[in-house]
Image (tube, rainbow, N blue to C red):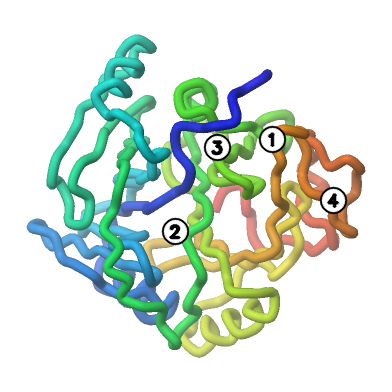
Amino acid sequence: MTKPFAPKVFQLGYVALECPDFERTKAHYAETIGMRQTDTGHDGEVYLSIGYEHHNIVLRKSEKKALANLGFQLQPGTDLKEMVKALAARGHSAQIKTDSQPGVRELLEVEPVPGVVFQLYPEIATPAPGFKRTGIAPLRLGHVAVISSHGEKLLQFFGEDLGFWQTDTIGGGVATFMTCNRDHHVVNVLSVPDDRVHHIAFELKGNASHAMASDALREEGVPVKWGPARHTAGHNLAGYHFDPDNVLIELYTDMDQFIPQLNMCEARPWHEHYPMQPRDWGFDELCAWETEFAFNLAHA
C-alpha cells in the first residue's frame, strides 16, 4: 500500500504506566535504568527523563498494572483542531487538553481501541536534566510493544490515521512491526486476546553497553531473562528483563534502518535476505543466532 512520506507523528515520546509496586518501580527506572525525575503530578505520579525531554516515562500508583497512555510527538506545524476533525470523520472521538500534565502545554487525546490511550502533542518541554552516569543510562526511548485484543483496529489506526509504515510481521501477523521514522519499528502490535503493554524498549549507547547493562542489572539483583541476542525482524541486538511490576523491558542497539521510498532496510552484512524488504518471519526464526529463549517471550 502506497503511503505518503510524512507520517503525522515522528517519534514515541513517552510511555505512562500504572504501577502497583510504585516505590520499587520508581527506583528501578530512576536508579537501575538511570533516569532523572523531573516532576511530580497532583496525584503523586512521577515524571522521569532519560536526559533531554521533560519526560519519557510516567509512573502512576495503582492497584493493578496497566498501560495508562502512549505519548507521540506530532510533526511540526500540526493543527490539533484539524486533526480532531479528521479523526472524527474516521469515527474516533478525540479531545484537546491543555496543561493536563507537566511539560506538555497542549495535546490531543484519543482512545482508538479499549485500553490504548494516545496522547499526541506538538511540543514538550526540554529542560535537559542531563544523562546519568550511573545505572544503565540509555540513550533514548525507542519503541513500545502493545498486546491488544483489537489488534486489527489498532493497526488501522497506526497505519491509516497516523501514517505509519509496516515493516515486518511474525507468525502471519500475530506480531506486526510499524514505524514513523527511520527505525525498523517504533511500535509492535501483538494481536492476541489480551490488553496490556508487552514491552518498552530503550536504546543503549552502543553494542558494548549490553555487557555493562547486564552487569548493572546483576548488581541490583535483576535477572536478564533473554539475550543479549540478535533478532531477525529489525536485527537489533536485544536483552530483556522485568521491572518490579513485571513489565518487560528491552535494551537494544543496532536496529535496522528503514527507507520508505525503497520499501527496504539499509543493507547489513548479517541480513538473511537482499533486499531486506518487509516480510513475515516464523516463530522458529525470532533470533538470528538460534539463541534459546529462557522464558516464553510471547506470553511475558
Residue that badge 4 annotates: 267
Q: Which mark is residue 260?
A: 1
* Crowd band around label 1 with a 10 angstrom C-alpha radius: few (<14), some (14–19), many (20+): many
Label 2: which secondary element: loop
The residue located at (67%, 30%) in the rendering is 173
- Mark 2 neighbour class, 10 Å CA radius: few under 14, some 14 to 19, many 20 or more: many
**Residue annotated with mark 2:** 247
Residue type at tag 4: Ala
Q: Earlier in the sequence, mark 2 or mark 4?
A: 2
In terms of sequence position, does the residue under pointer 1 or pointer 4 come before the other?
1
Mark found first going from the N terminus, 2 or 1 = 2
> Is mark 2 in CB contact (under 8 Å) with mark 4?
no
Would residue 153 be visible to someone looking at this image? Answer: no
Q: Which of marks 4 and 3 precedes in the sequence?
A: 3
The CA distance from mark 1 to mark 4 is 14 Å
| Horizontal and vertical percent position of residue 225 | 61, 68
